[in-house]
Image (cartoon, rainbow, N blue to C red):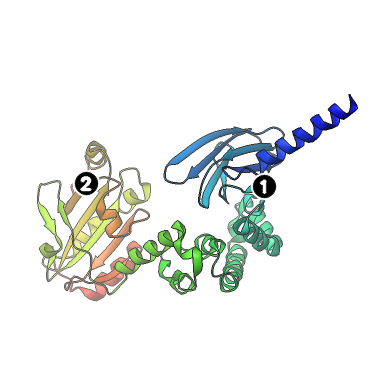
Amino acid sequence: MKYWCVCFIVCNVFMLTSCKNNKNLFIVEGNIPNLTNNNLYVVTTSDDIKIDTVQARLGKFYYKASSDSVIPILIYMEKQSIWMTIWAQNGDDIKIEGDVNCPELIAVKGNEINNLLTEFKSKNHSIIQERCDLVDEKNPDNDARINDMEQFLKEEAKSFIQKHPSSVASLVLIQDYLLSSGEQDSISPYLSMIEGYAKNDRLYKKLTAIVERYQRTAIGNPAPDFSLISTNNDTLTLSNFKNKYLLLTFETSECDMCDEGYADLVAIRKKYSKKQLEMMTVVLNEDRSKWEKMTENKKNSWYQVVEARTSEMRSLYNVTTVPYNYLIDEKGLIFAKDISPDSLKHVLKEQLKKVKS
């Protein structure tokens, strides 16, 4: 009887171990205290996007799935208001542990990518923790200190990338710490350091594409050509604006800041002759009726184009936020982009002669 019990226990241990080391699956075990909502959403992104709901008990949860290659997995917590990314492939046993109040410091172990990223976080634990605390305070007086810490983390990330050029972890740090809006080209020197299997990763291709789009719309480069139909059924291409400046703006009907900037566009239109300056607004809306409602009390005196949010124009001009603007000169070159209304007025004053409308 005793022998049978021992045998039973050994067999069960063997079965659990075999399951845990199944080369056809990866396993994720998490321990995240202080969760106020036990529903977690796990999003795996291999060839298809798969979303699973996982229940946590006292902060602990378990998840298993399959992927032949290393993929990023997003775990959404606290009604999807907080998320983190881990990396896994078949055969991995991933361990997650940390505090939901600072997801950036949650430790992930179980393969080279997760281990290196956790090592980076551990090395900079005090800085990351302080930044989390200051951001949570939402005090404008903290902005200068937060900027200093973010600059410090950028330098730490650069040093890490130089030491680990063949790891996907370096790509993650490029994305999380070096990639800033309006400064996408600044990551080029660090992407050029990447080597080995990391160059075949999807994230490398994604970051390279971001840089290419940014460079395509860099100041001084020819503006990408387009063919659009205006709300008045005019066919518009870049050649329509030859030998004059074009102020090209992007917005949506839901954008409050776009609405606030409308008066500035009206003032610019009144100030400059159409012989020198043309204007075109591309409204990224799925539903034209929303644009009509937005403009029902406005008399637009410049070209309007309503395009889907997935419009090729959005990709062509690398529009990642709204409002967004471009000033294209009389030679079809990008003269300025993403500048404030006040700066835009100053640039136009310098470049165009004042004429009565």
Q: Which mark is residue 96?
A: 1
- Name the residue: 43% across, 71% down: 188
- Name the residue: 12% across, 68% down: 242
- Residue 181 visible within the image: no
User: Secondary structure beneath disc 1?
Assistant: strand
Front-lying residue, 302 or 307: 307
Residue type, numbered disc 1: Ile
In percent of width and height, residue 302 lies at 16, 54
- Residue 91 visible within the image: yes
Question: Which image quadrant for residue 28?
Answer: top right
In percent of width and height, residue 247 lies at 23, 62
* Residue, disc 2: 306
User: Secondary structure beneath disc 2?
Assistant: strand
Is the residue under label 2 in contact with that under label 1 (CB below 8 Å)? no
- Name the residue: 53% across, 47% down: 73
Q: Residues within 10 Å of mark 1 (few under 14, many from 20)?
A: some
Front-lying residue, 9 or 157: 9
Rounded to the nearest angstrom, the CA distance separating label 1 from label 2 is: 46 Å
In percent of width and height, residue 352 lies at 20, 73
In the image, 51: left or right of 217? right
